[in-house]
Amino acid sequence: MGRPIGKKASTATAIPLTCSKGDLAHLLGISVRSVSDWDQKGVFVRAVGRGRFETVASVNGYTAALREQAAGRASATGQSLTDERALTEKVIRQIKERELAKLTGETLTLGEVTESWSMFAQTVRAAVLSIPGKARSTIPHLTAHDADVLKHLCRDILMDLAEEVEAAVVSGVPEEISGEK
């Protein structure tokens, strides 16, 4: 049995001590999904039994949360508006810092970095692939077979480097790439 409400005990309706999620949704005029959301925020008071809520305490918690929200002391996410504003200001400040760094030339665009590294990789590739020819011209007794072996070794080294770069940079962990910890 619940607690009677109303002026006269003989005509009073009893509020059940506990209710289900559906009953609470019906009582408050919200969806069952909203009950789940508010429950996750800790607004409703759980009762003994699966999916049960203390009726009066949950209604009071819900109205208190709505009052806080209306007064501007809480947001719909459950965080205080002060915390949300501070987080928003922090993000805005970070964006402005990055824009300023870009304008002052302290940062490079992804295109600039990609172009630089592509040119560097081409230079290294050309230098490594020139080793067999330089070796053959400076060591005259090398045979064509020796030059071929050097050529294959250089290509294998370049392929190994390409695989290491692929593993470390392209599919690596972003924190490791950017240097953030």
Image: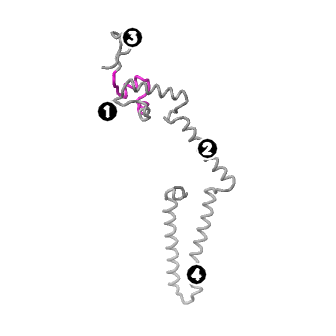
Crowding near the residue tagged with mark 3, few <14, some 14–19, many ≥20 C-alpha atoms within 10 Å: few
The one nearer the camera, 67 or 148, is 67
Q: Secondary structure at mark 4?
A: helix
Q: Tell me whether circle 3 and circle 4 mark residues in contact (CB < 8 Å).
A: no
Q: Position of residue 175 (x, y in %)?
A: 51, 56
Residue type, numbered disc 3: Lys
Q: Secondary structure at mark 1?
A: loop
Q: Which mark is residue 133?
A: 4
The one nearer the camera, 34 or 56, is 56
Q: Tell me whether circle 3 and circle 1 mark residues in contact (CB < 8 Å).
A: no
Q: Tell me whether circle 2 and circle 3 mark residues in contact (CB < 8 Å).
A: no
- The extreme right residue here reads 104
Q: Which residue is mark 3?
A: 7
Residue type, numbered disc 2: Ile
Sequence order check: which comes first, mark 3 or mark 4? Answer: 3
Q: CA distance from mark 3 to mark 4?
A: 105 Å
Tell me where the magenta segment starts and ends, as one range: 16-36
Residue type, numbered disc 4: Gly
**Viewer-side label of 3, 4:** 3
* The stretch drawn in magenta includes residue 24: yes
Q: Is residue 103 left or right of residue 181?
A: right
Residue type, numbered disc 1: Arg
Q: Which mark is residue 50?
A: 1
